[in-house]
Image (spheres, coloured by chain):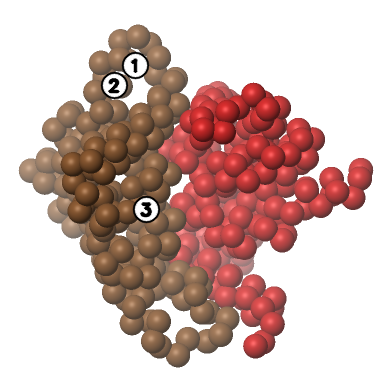
Chain colours: A red, B brown
Amino acid sequence: MKSSDWKDFTNGIVRENPIFRLLIGLCPALAVSTSAVDALGMGLATTFVLAASNGVISLLRTLIPPDLRIPIFIVVVSTFVTAADYLMLAFFPAIHRSLGVFVPLIVVNCIVLGRAEAFAYRNEVRASLLDGLGMGLGFSLALGLLGALREVFGAGTLFGLAVMPASYPPLLLLVLPPGAFLLIGLLIAGLNRFTRRAP
Amino acid sequence: MRLFAIFFGAMIVNNILLMRFLGLCSFFGISNKLENAVSMTWAVTFVMAMASLVTWGLYHFLLLPLGLVFLRTAFFILVIAALVQLVEMYMKKNAPGLYRALGIYLPLITTNCAILAVAFLNIDYGYSLLESLVYTVGVSGGYGVAIVLFASLRERVDKAPVPEAFKGYPIAFILAGLLSLAFMGFAGMFGIQL
């Protein structure tokens, strides 16, 4: 693996992590992170859409006229979103049900269109695929972290298995909507504390 | 009574921003000034109402009879994008004052997930045309209430001594969490569940 490939791949995981760094794609991140399973399901579906649409757009980039690029991006992205929607319905109906309207809403996830415009339209196929995978993985990890924290402390379980001692009273607030806002606020503040240099 | 329940549920109990987490990009992006929040609310209300009407009609009179339901994601987002363009062109020519007031918020609305979500939810909940309209008006009212409250709070917090690490987004998230907590108090009102 070349070093530039590695850079394209890890860019979305750490340096430009969509959730914690760029703060985009927040709606699904907060809405479906009530349990680790839902969060990872959403993350993987988004990763699939990101990598596939990045690849196709990069492949077609010389054919796409600049004035028409946004509608064409939208058509490509929504094709893969529809595929992901029906694949999930067929193979993981339980997750599909609990994600609900957020699966088709991947089409308006700013990360997907953002990467198409900012990366795939200007770079070759290989780099675009890696960028899509890396961004998707960064998104999945952030979602998984949120989902795991909310599930462990909010319900005392992880992936549905009890992990906390029976005497632990679940902090119900965390699995309710306000908990999502509070948790992500605290996480980003913690991240700032350790990465931002004192002025 | 059913219509009232739909309206109140959409506006307060299941508030689109604070309870459903839809349209958060604009919620955090635009809410640093009260007047921007108000302009955005008008733009959202307007586009959401039009989008709901058009997508409801398209779904029930075109996609459903032709058996093309699987195309709805692609169809809806393209229709909304085209609609926003048309509204923008129409307003530029016939209502320049309003056009200037809404400014950059109009094109941004295409990627506001609340618009597309309402189009989907109208279908998923099996609403009639009238119910869809009531639901849409409720949702956009709720959007307005939440974003105006939030923008006012943020204007105050800007002047408060916030710890260094919490400046900017983190404190905004904490604020949103507290606001959301307050809205939790409405759960179960008139028998409307979360």
Query: The residue under label 1 is which amino acid type?
Result: Leu
Vertical comparison of A113 with A138: above or below: above
Q: Position of residue B153 (x, y in %)?
A: 32, 76
| Quadrant of res B149 | bottom left
| Residue A20 visible, this angle | yes
Q: Position of residue A59 (x, y in %)?
A: 71, 27
Q: Residues within 10 Å of mark 2 (few under 14, many from 20)?
A: some
- Horizontal arrangement in the rendering, residue B105 relative to residue A137 (left or right): left
Q: Nearer the viewer, mark 1 or mark 3?
A: 3
Q: Disc 2 marks which residue? A: B58
> What is the chain identity of the residue bearing mark 3?
B
Kindly state the secondary structure of the residue where label 3 is placed: loop
Query: The residue under label 2 is which amino acid type?
Result: Leu
Q: Share a chain, discs 2 and 3?
A: yes
Q: Mark 2 touching mark 1, by CB under 8 A?
A: yes
- Horizontal arrangement in the rendering, residue A186 relative to residue A118 (left or right): left
Q: CA distance from mark 1 to mark 3?
A: 32 Å
Q: CA distance from mark 2 to mark 3?
A: 28 Å
The residue closer to the viewer here, A122 or B111, is: A122
Q: Disc 3 marks which residue? A: B104
Number of labels in the image equals 3
Q: Residues within 10 Å of mark 1 (few under 14, many from 20)?
A: some
Q: Say which label, 1 or 3, has the lower sequence index.
A: 1
Q: Say which label, 2 or 3, has the lower sequence index.
A: 2
| Residue B63 numbered mark, or none | 1
> What is the chain identity of the residue bearing mark 2?
B
Q: Quadrant of the N terminus of chain B?
A: top left
Vertical comparison of B136 with B39: above or below: above
